[in-house]
């Protein structure tokens, strides 16, 4: 997929926000630590990066739950498979 810069930046900022929120509310990180984790998980990719935006195929909730609970979070914490209403309210 080819991303227009503005569209890519909108997605990136939205995912930073969502990931940081989950890491703070479910992962116990401070607001600063959560922001740093989000920036590390979603680095800016230049327009010519071959797989730019591929990370957007799953939402921030999923990537954060993997970071917090590991690869088996869907089996070990089935209540966390779907994002919480509070997370959905961020949209």
Image (cartoon, rainbow, N blue to C red):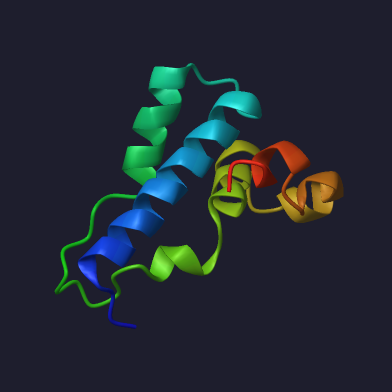
Residue located at (55% from left, 63% from top): 58
Q: Quadrant of the N terminus?
A: bottom left
Residue 89 lies in quadrant: top right
Q: Is residue 14 above or below residue 33?
A: below
- Left or right of residue 53, residue 89 in this image: right
Residue located at (68% from left, 47% from top): 88
Residue 29: x and y, percent?
Answer: 52, 21
Residue located at (40% from left, 39% from top): 38
Q: Is residue 2 above or below residue 46?
A: below
Q: Is residue 47 above or below residue 41?
A: below
- Front residue of 47/36: it is 47
- Front residue of 30/6: it is 6
Residue 53: x and y, percent?
Answer: 35, 67
Residue 44: x and y, percent?
Answer: 24, 53
Count the marks. 0
Q: Is residue 53 above or below residue 2?
A: above
- Front residue of 16/4: it is 4
Residue located at (58% from left, 48% from top): 91
- In the displayed image of the protein, which residue is found farthest to the bottom? 1
Residue 75: x and y, percent?
Answer: 82, 54
Residue 34 lies in quadrant: top left
């Amino acid at each position: 997929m080819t991303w227009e810069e503005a569209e890519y930046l909108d997605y990136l900022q939205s995912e930073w926000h969502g990931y940081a929120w989950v890491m703070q509310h479910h992962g116990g990180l401070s607001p600063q630590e959560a922001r740093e984790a989000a920036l590390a998980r979603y680095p800016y990719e230049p327009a010519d990066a071959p797989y730019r935006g591929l990370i957007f195929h799953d939402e921030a909730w999923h990537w954060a739950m993997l970071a917090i609970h590991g690869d088996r979070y869907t089996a070990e914490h089935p209540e966390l498979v779907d994002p919480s209403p509070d997370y959905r309210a961020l949209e």
